[in-house]
């Protein structure tokens, strides 16, 4: 039976009882399971201390901020001391700053408890930063399982390649790149390759020491994002939109023509018919 699986769940909508205090919200499930009063009190206060909500135990949810309510929801799961936690998009209702803060808190909590945790999210940054292992799903089918860096560095499918990483991986036809390849950079790709993925941060604005492909482009849009910049390009002879991510703010202007350079280490070979990576 589901109730016997010993899995505690945390949802995006907090699932708190508005008429109960924080203390009673934390204690409610334990009372229903017949725990003794002293045991309930010890578990509630331990969880409240761990989540830094001790000062809010006598408040009702409407008196709490979004982040505080999410901590209470986590506390309700925590007091059960379950075999596993299931987090279902727990941060999606929070603003950007609070999401980052709660993401760090969830990771620190999991490290302290060492309890198996399943975390469901559409946010690839949450997945990359929180997960020890990722399972990437597409329409209910598993696309790839691996550590965050395994999946980022060697995506098994085009779906994974474009889903993990921001900005998304550029996908260019092999035929187009072959027309620009004067140094044999593509010579080692498997014969079934017809599409090549290149991450935005692997496209360089200065010629590298290793053999490279030169791509002529026009800068259509420049986004300055503080420590990095995003350059949205139209490649000459291609209608494929392309993004370059680079450190700082390079001296370029919208409408300017420029060259970008790609080495063999930056290439992710795929077959567009199967959608799968062609090199392992």
Image (cartoon, grey):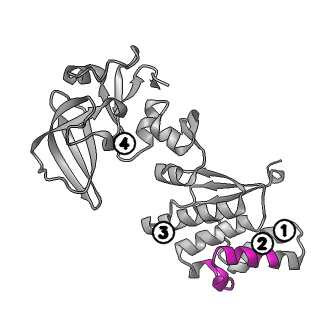
Q: Considering only vertical position in the picture, is 117 above or below 112?
A: above
- The part of the chain drawn in magenta is 42-61
The residue to which callout 3 is attached is 98
Sequence-wise, the earlier of marks 4 and 2 is: 2
The residue to which callout 2 is attached is 28
Provide the secondary structure element on which disc 2 rests: helix
Provide the secondary structure element on which disc 4 rests: loop
| Crowd band around label 2 with a 10 angstrom C-alpha radius: few (<14), some (14–19), many (20+) | some
Q: Does the stretch in magenta take in 47? A: yes
The residue to which callout 4 is attached is 168
| Crowd band around label 3 with a 10 angstrom C-alpha radius: few (<14), some (14–19), many (20+) | some
Whole-number angstrom distance, CA of label 3 to CA of label 2: 27 Å
Q: Nearer the viewer, mark 4 or mark 2?
A: 4
Residue drawn at the location 51% of the way across and 50% of the way down = 128
Q: Nearer the viewer, residue 270 or 267?
A: 267
Residue 26 picture location, percent across and down = 73, 73
With 217 as the anchor, is 268 left or right in this view?
Answer: right
Q: Considering only vertical position in the picture, is 16 above or below 170?
A: below
Residue drawn at the location 57% of the way across and 82% of the way down = 63
Residue drawn at the location 28% of the way across and 62% of the way down = 226
Whole-number angstrom distance, CA of label 3 to CA of label 4: 24 Å
Q: Nearer the viewer, residue 113 or 8?
A: 113
With 110 as the anchor, is 35 left or right in this view?
Answer: right
Label 2–label 1 contact, CB within 8 A: yes
| Crowd band around label 1 with a 10 angstrom C-alpha radius: few (<14), some (14–19), many (20+) | few
Q: Nearer the viewer, mark 1 or mark 3?
A: 3
Q: Does the stretch in magenta take in 57? A: yes
The residue to which callout 1 is attached is 32
Q: Is residue 59 visible?
A: no
């Amino acid at each position: 039976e589901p109730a016997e699986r010993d899995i505690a769940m945390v949802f995006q909508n907090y699932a708190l009882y508005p008429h109960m205090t924080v203390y009673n919200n934390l204690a409610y499930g334990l009372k229903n399971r017949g725990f003794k009063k002293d045991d309930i009190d010890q578990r509630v206060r331990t969880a409240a201390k761990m989540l830094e909500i001790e000062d809010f135990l006598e408040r009702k949810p409407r008196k709490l901020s979004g982040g505080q309510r999410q901590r209470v929801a986590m506390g309700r799961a925590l007091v059960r001391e379950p075999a596993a936690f299931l987090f279902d998009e727990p941060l999606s209702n929070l603003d950007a700053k609070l999401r980052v803060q709660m993401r760090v808190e969830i990771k620190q909590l999991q490290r302290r408890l060492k309890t198996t945790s399943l975390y469901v999210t559409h946010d690839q940054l949450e997945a990359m930063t929180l997960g020890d292992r990722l399972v990437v799903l597409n329409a209910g089918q598993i696309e790839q399982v691996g550590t965050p860096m395994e999946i980022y560095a060697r995506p098994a499918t085009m779906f994974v390649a474009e889903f993990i990483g921001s900005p998304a991986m550029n996908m260019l036809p092999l035929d187009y790149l072959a027309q620009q390849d004067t140094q044999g950079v593509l010579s080692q790709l498997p014969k079934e390759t017809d599409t090549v993925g290149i991450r935005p941060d692997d496209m360089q604005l200065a010629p590298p020491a290793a053999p490279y492909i030169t791509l002529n482009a026009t800068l259509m849009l420049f986004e300055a994002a503080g420590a990095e910049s995003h350059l949205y390009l139209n490649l000459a002879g291609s209608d494929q939109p392309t993004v370059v991510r680079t450190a700082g703010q390079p001296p370029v202007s919208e409408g300017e023509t420029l060259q970008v350079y790609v080495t063999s280490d930056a290439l992710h070979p795929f077959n567009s018919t199967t959608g799968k990576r062609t090199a392992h």
